[in-house]
Structure formats: structure tokens, C-alpha cells
């Protein structure tokens, strides 16, 4: 027999009538207090950063930070990363079940044959400076897609949502790769239907019209792992942004563009880029002690990037997968003697053994290893967050579609705790002090 409470009571110290609120339970995780009726009683809750507030119900992704657990539709990330490709995981996020062989073949064909961009979209790229950050370009190009693909924009029509989802998933690698090519001043490379999702991105990013390019299978497999491990991560800042923008009925391209903008923030998707910048600032193994000391100093604002995680209080489950992939890539490319990679591996060793970091559970996270892998593959720091956005598109569109299909969803309208001036009367300018 369940001993979970079915209601919560809020009492007040001014003898006002207590308020009873229902308790809700999910499949996994903490129970929540349903506070929707509080406004009728003239009070609201105050929760900056939504640290203790569930803004939606979802059956896509579940995280247990204490246990280091990440599930997509109930499947552990370790199993998905080991046995699935990215499109299979994307199908799972979008449709709720892993595809059978026929469903996977059909889904893969749909995505692979819709990777080309409308020809006039190339003009949008050319409107940017050549040195514009790839994320700035992606925000603009994805947002502009609503002016090119407006035939399926009814967000309350399931078929329209599916068409838009497939378009975004198919075209995002092209947009990301072209943002890099534009940065370099190289010709845009058209997608190749014969290549898989990861290989196709690598081809568009690294190939030129001058010579044949064949993606290295070890590197393509590693890139596939990066995409899978970043596909979705519950109600983080960018996913919440996609939901909030989408809650107004905004079209999917505007919603995903807003998600990309949120991801660009250094406190969110920029962690792997910041990790590599930190390693380059260290420069040499001999300086690790200096930076470790700074990280321990509470009066120093320096943070050791790539260690610890806001959600995970134990090991990031994605980190061990990426760690293995990292060593596979380094072995394939013979980069163990590269100064930055030697520095990273030594920093990893010290942090895993140092009592300070172990006691605070500041383990290397997925960003620490994914940044190293992407650098080894020849991907510049400026593209790290763009690739994160490419991967997270699968989760964003699944979350956006789920929200629009939810009969309980409403336009987002957070409350506030007002701390400004009370009512004042207007004073003519000649009477103001």
C-alpha cells in the first residue's frame, strides 16, 4: 500500500485559512505539489531559475543526478550509445519507441533525402560577415527557414509537426557545416545521400570540390557518439526556451532558433569550447598545479571547466562513454604526444585522484571529453557549440511536438515578485527635485 502523501497543506502565520494542494507523482523522480490553484488564494511561489518547479509534464527524458542516470523513453543512455545510431535515437525521442527495421529504413531515407537547403537560403549566409560566429549564423538561418518552408506551419496539426520536425533534423547538419564553410570562405558542399548522418556532416564540413573526401570510420563513429550523448537532456535552459517560445504557437523554426540562442550562452552549451580555451591557456603540464590551486581558492573566480555538472551529483553517465571514445580517437590519429592532449589527460588523472575534487564530486563531464575529441578531429573551437545545437535539435523538436500535443499546455506566463516603487503621482518637470 502506497504511503506517499496525496495532498500538501500550506499554513500561514496570520491565522489565514490553510490551503490544500494536490500531490502528483510521475513514473520516476520526486513528487510535485500542484500549485496551479494558488493564484485563486492571492499567493504565488518564488523560484528563481526554476530550481524546484516542474513547468511541464514529459515522457521523453529522465535524469537522476544523484545516481548518475540518464534515460531516453526509459532506455539508459549507455545502451543507446552502444547499440544505436543517432537517427535511431532521434526516432525514439520523436515517436516514443525504437524503430523496427522497416521503420528505421523509412525514417533514414526521409531524413537523408531532405538534407538539401532551398537554393535561396545560401543568400542568407552571404548576408553575414565572414568572421561571424557559426552560432550567430545558425540562429539567423534557422529562423529564416519559416520564410521558405511555410507549407506545414500549423503547430496543432500532427502531420505538419512531423514534416517540420523531419525538415529540421535533415537540414541542420547542412546549416551547421555551411556556417563553417562560410567562415572559411570555402564553397558550400552539398549533402550526399549515400552517406550516413555523421559521415554526411563530416563530408560537408571537410570536403572541397578539389579532391575526393572519405570520412574516417573511427572518427565518424566518434562523431555519432557525440550526437547521441547530446541529443536531449530533459528541461534544461535551451529546451525550456524552445517550449516557452513554442507555447505561444510560434512556428517550429522560430522556436528552435530561440533554443540555439539559449544554448550559445557560456553557462550552457559553451562548456566544451570553454574547456579547450582553458587548456590552451594552461599551455603546459607544468602549469596544472597552478590552475588546480586557483580552482580550490574560494577568493579566485577561476573555475576548472569540464568538471562537475549542475545536475549530476555523481559521475556524468555520458562522460565514461565519451572517455572511451576519446581514447579511441587519440589512438586512431596518434595524438597522444600532442601537448594539449597530454595536458588534458594529466589534468583528468589529477582531478580523479585529488581529494578535493573527489570529495566535491567534481568529475570530468561529457564536455571535457567531447571537446578533446572534436579538436582531434580538426573541428575548431567555434564549431563546438554549433555541433551541440545540431545534436540537440532531435530533443528540441521532440519536446516541442510533445508540448503542442498536450491538451493541458498553455502559453508560458511566469509570475514575478515585484520589488519596485509603489504607486506614485506624476510630477511636472519644473517641480521635480
Image (cartoon, rainbow, N blue to C red):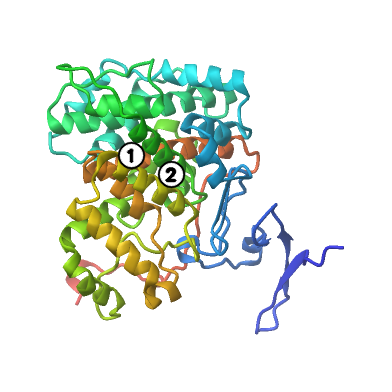
Dot 1 and dot 2 residues touching (CB under 8 Å): no
What kind of element bears circle 1?
helix
Q: Quadrant of residue 97?
A: top right
At a point 63% along the width and 39% down the height, the residue shown is: 406
- Which one is earlier in the sequence, the residue at label 1 or at label 2? 2
* Residue 186 place in picture, x, y as percent: 14, 25
Give the labeled residue for mark 1. 387
Q: Position of residue 118 (x, y in %)?
A: 31, 17
Identify the image quadrant of residue 388.
top left
Figure disc tally: 2
- The percent coordinates of residue 300 (x first, y second) are 24, 77
**Real-space Cα separation, disc 1 to disc 2, in angstroms:** 9 Å
- Above or below residue 417? Residue 330 is above
Q: Tell me, yes or no, if residue 406 can be seen here.
A: yes
Residue at point 28%, 63% (across, down): 346
Compared with 233, 111 (above or below) is above
Pick whichever, 282 or 103, lies toward us: 282
- Dot 2 crowding, Cα within 10 Å, few <14, some 14–19, many 20+: many
For image coordinates 62% across by 48% down, the residue present is 57
Residue at position x 48%, y 17% in the image: 110
Position of the C terminus, as image quadrant, is bottom left
Please provide percent x and percent y for residue 428: 23, 67
The numbered mark at residue 230 is 2
Amino acid at each position: 500500500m502506497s504511503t506517499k502523501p496525496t495532498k500538501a497543506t500550506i499554513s500561514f502565520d496570520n491565522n489565514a485559512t490553510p490551503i490544500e494542494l494536490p500531490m502528483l507523482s510521475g513514473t520516476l523522480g520526486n513528487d510535485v505539489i500542484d500549485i496551479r490553484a494558488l493564484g485563486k488564494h492571492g499567493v504565488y511561489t518564488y523560484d528563481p531559475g526554476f530550481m524546484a518547479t516542474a513547468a511541464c509534464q514529459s515522457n521523453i527524458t529522465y535524469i537522476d543526478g544523484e545516481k548518475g542516470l540518464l534515460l531516453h523513453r526509459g532506455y539508459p543512455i549507455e545502451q543507446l550509445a552502444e547499440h544505436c545510431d543517432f537517427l535511431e535515437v532521434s526516432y525514439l525521442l520523436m515517436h516514443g519507441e525504437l524503430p523496427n527495421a522497416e521503420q528505421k529504413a523509412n525514417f533514414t531515407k526521409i531524413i537523408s533525402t531532405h538534407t538539401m537547403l532551398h537554393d535561396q537560403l545560401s543568400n542568407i549566409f552571404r548576408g553575414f560577415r565572414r568572421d561571424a560566429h557559426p552560432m550567430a549564423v545558425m540562429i539567423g538561418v534557422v529562423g529564416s527557414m519559416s520564410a521558405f518552408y511555410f507549407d506545414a506551419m500549423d503547430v496543432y496539426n500532427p502531420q505538419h509537426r512531423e514534416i517540420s520536425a523531419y525538415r529540421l533534423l535533415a537540414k541542420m547538419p547542412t546549416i551547421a557545416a555551411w556556417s563553417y564553410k562560410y567562415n572559411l570562405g570555402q564553397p558550400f558542399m552539398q549533402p550526399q545521400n549515400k552517406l550516413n548522418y555523421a559521415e554526411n556532416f563530416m563530408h560537408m564540413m571537410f570536403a572541397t570540390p578539389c579532391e575526393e573526401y572519405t570520412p574516417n570510420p573511427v572518427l565518424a563513429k566518434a562523431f555519432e557518439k557525440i550526437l547521441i550523448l547530446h541529443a536531449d537532456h530533459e528541461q534544461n535552459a535551451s529546451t525550456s526556451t524552445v517550449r516557452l517560445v513554442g507555447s505561444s504557437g510560434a512556428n517550429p523554426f522560430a522556436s528552435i532558433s530561440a533554443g540555439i540562442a539559449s544554448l550559445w550562452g557560456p553557462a550552457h552549451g559553451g562548456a566544451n569550447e570553454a574547456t579547450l580555451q582553458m587548456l590552451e591557456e594552461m599551455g603546459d603540464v607544468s602549469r596544472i598545479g597552478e590552475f588546480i590551486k586557483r580552482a580550490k581558492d574560494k577568493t579566485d573566480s577561476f573555475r576548472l571547466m569540464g568538471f562537475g555538472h549542475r545536475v549530476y551529483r555523481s559521475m556524468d553517465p555520458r562522460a565514461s562513454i565519451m572517455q572511451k571514445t576519446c581514447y579511441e580517437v587519440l589512438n586512431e590519429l596518434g595524438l597522444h604526444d600532442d601537448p594539449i592532449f597530454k595536458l588534458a589527460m594529466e589534468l583528468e588523472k589529477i582531478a580523479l585522484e585529488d581529494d578535493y575534487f573527489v570529495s566535491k564530486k567534481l568529475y570530468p563531464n561529457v564536455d571535457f571529453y567531447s571537446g578533446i575529441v572534436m579538436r582531434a578531429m580538426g573541428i575548431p573551437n567555434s564549431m563546438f557549440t554549433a555541433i551541440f545545437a545540431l545534436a540537440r535539435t532531435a530533443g528540441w523538436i521532440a519536446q516541442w511536438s510533445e508540448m503542442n500535443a498536450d491538451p493541458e499546455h498553455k502559453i508560458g506566463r511566469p509570475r514575478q515578485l515585484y520589488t519596485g516603487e509603489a504607486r506614485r503621482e506624476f510630477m511636472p518637470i519644473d517641480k521635480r527635485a
